[in-house]
């Protein structure tokens, strides 16, 4: 899989670099290809998967917007909860629907490493990319 990373905001795009970054608006020239970015993170922290891989729960019956066809995507970083400290924390969670970027949640050490996304779009698979300030990018996917 081809992976392109925005040098300005660390956003990832799959398959090809976009004309402009959907997160920060940087031009295509600011994207750098690195198809091994997830492997590099796993090599940096071989035991880190248990604290870094996003745990995804799909809830087809949305509680926030029940009058619409809404799907909740609940994300928690790590089977064992990732620490959120000044020196070691998750900076963001990006959600993709069928490899198309949908949304970003920014995190800080004052927050827990998790988020809820309320999808009105339909698709077959969600992916969540998370960025740890020390151990890099991690990804997980789930069918919806």
Image (tube, helix red, strand yellow):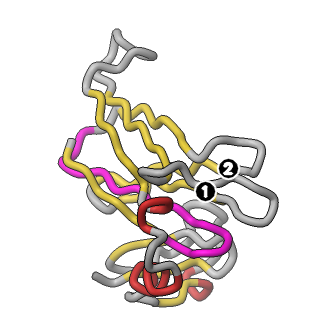
Check contact, mark 1 vs mark 2: CB within 8 A: yes
Q: What x and y, as percent, mark residue 46?
A: 44, 79
Structural distance between the alpha carbons of marks 1 and 2: 5 Å
Say whether residue 31 is left or right of residue 67: right
Q: Name the outermost residue toward the top.
A: 67
Q: What x and y, as percent, mark residue 139?
A: 39, 65
Residue in front for this viewpoint, 68 or 138: 138
Residue at the spot x=48%, y=51% of the render?
80
Above or below: residue 65 compared with residue 17:
above
- The stretch of residues the image draws in magenta is 122-137
The residue wearing badge 2 is 107
User: How dense is the environment of label 2, judged by Cα within 10 Å: few (below 14), some, or many (20 and up)?
Assistant: some
Res. 42 visible in picture: yes
Residue at the spot x=36%, y=74% of the render?
14
Residue at the spot x=33%, y=84% of the render?
2
Quadrant of the rendering where the N terminus is positioned: bottom left
Say whether residue 48 is left or right of residue 3: right
- Circle 1 sits in a helix, a strand or a loop, which is it? strand
Above or below: residue 22 compared with residue 73:
below
Which quadrant of the figure has residue 36?
bottom left
The residue wearing badge 1 is 92
Quadrant of the rendering where the C terminus is positioned: top left
> Is residue 56 inside the magenta stretch?
no
Above or below: residue 102 compared with residue 117:
below
Q: What x and y, as percent, mark residue 120?
A: 35, 31
Q: Which one is earlier in the sequence, the residue at label 1 or at label 2?
A: 1
Res. 129 visible in picture: no
Helix, strand or loop for the magenta stretch, by majority: strand
Residue in front for this viewpoint, 105 or 89: 89
Q: What x and y, as percent, mark residue 79?
A: 42, 51
């Amino acid at each position: 899989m081809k992976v392109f990373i925005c040098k300005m905001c660390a956003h990832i795009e799959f398959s090809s670099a976009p004309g402009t970054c959907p997160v920060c608006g940087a031009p295509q020239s600011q994207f750098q290809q690195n198809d091994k970015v997830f492997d590099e993170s796993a090599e940096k922290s071989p035991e880190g998967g248990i604290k870094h891989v996003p745990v995804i729960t799909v809830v087809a019956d949305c509680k926030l917007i029940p009058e619409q066809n809404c799907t909740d995507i609940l994300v928690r970083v790590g089977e064992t909860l990732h620490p959120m400290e000044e020196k070691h924390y998750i900076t963001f969670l990006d959600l993709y629907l069928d490899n198309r970027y949908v949304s970003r949640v920014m995190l800080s050490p004052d927050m827990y490493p998790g988020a809820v996304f309320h999808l009105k779009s339909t698709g077959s698979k969600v992916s969540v990319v998370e960025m740890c300030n020390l151990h890099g990018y991690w990804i997980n996917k789930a069918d919806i």
